[in-house]
C-alpha cells in the first residue's frame, strides 16, 4: 500500500432514525468500534430507512468506510474550518419580520 492508496473497510453498523416531536435524528454506530477520521468517507449499504411520524427505527446494516490518504487527511484538517464558515450565512437588516 502506498501513501496515495485509499484503504476500504466493510464494517457492521446500526442505523437509528427517529421522526418524533422530541427528537428528529439519524445516527450510525459502528458495531465493531471503528472510528471515522477527517477526510474519511462512509457509505451505508441498503435501502433508505424511512420512519413515519412518531416512530424510531433501528436496523442492522453494513457500511463501507473509505479511509483518506495522509495527504487527504492533512488537507481536510487544514481547510475544514474554512468550509464550516461557508455554512454560516449572516444577515442584518433594520426591518422587523413578523
Image (spheres, rainbow, N blue to C red):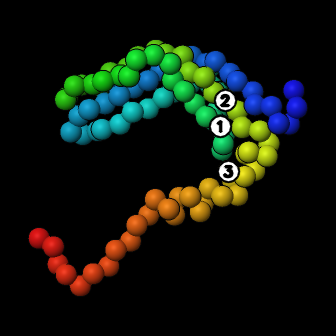
Q: Secondary structure at mark 1?
A: loop
Q: Is residue 70 visible?
A: yes
The numbered dot on residue 40 is 1
Neighbourhood count class around disc 1 (C-alpha, 10 Å): few under 14, some 14–19, many 20 upward: some
Find the residue positioned furthest to the bottom. 94
The part of the image, by quadrant, that contains residue 39 is top right
Tell me the quarter of the image containing the C terminus.
bottom left
Q: Is residue 46 left or right of residue 19?
A: right
Q: Are marks 3 and 1 in contact (CB under 8 Å)?
A: no
The numbered dot on residue 76 is 3
Q: Is residue 67 left or right of residue 30?
A: right
- Residue 35 vertical position relative to residue 71 in the rendered view, above or below: above
Calculate the distance from the C-alpha at mark 2 to the C-alpha at mark 3: 14 Å
Image coordinates for residue 52, horizontal then vertical, percent:
22, 25
User: Residue placed at 53% from the left, 58% from the top?
Assistant: 84
Image coordinates for residue 58, horizontal then vertical, percent:
38, 20
- Residue 77 vertical position relative to residue 39 in the rendered view, above or below: below
- Residue 3 vertical position relative to residue 63 in the rendered view, above or below: below
Q: Is residue 31 visible?
A: no
Mark 2 vs 3, N-terminal side: 2
Mark 2 vs 1, N-terminal side: 1
Tell me the quarter of the image containing the N terminus.
top right
Q: Are marks 2 and 1 in contact (CB under 8 Å)?
A: yes
Calculate the distance from the C-alpha at mark 3 to the C-alpha at mark 1: 9 Å
Amino acid at each position: 500500500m502506498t501513501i496515495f492508496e485509499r484503504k476500504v473497510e466493510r464494517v457492521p453498523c446500526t442505523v437509528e432514525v427517529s421522526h418524533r416531536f422530541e427528537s428528529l435524528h439519524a445516527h450510525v454506530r459502528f458495531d465493531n468500534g471503528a472510528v471515522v477520521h477527517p477526510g474519511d468517507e462512509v457509505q451505508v449499504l441498503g435501502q433508505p430507512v424511512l420512519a413515519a411520524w412518531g416512530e424510531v427505527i433501528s436496523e442492522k446494516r453494513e457500511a463501507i468506510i473509505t479511509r483518506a490518504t495522509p495527504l487527504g487527511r492533512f488537507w481536510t484538517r487544514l481547510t475544514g474550518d474554512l468550509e464550516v464558515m461557508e455554512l454560516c450565512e449572516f444577515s442584518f437588516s433594520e426591518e422587523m419580520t413578523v
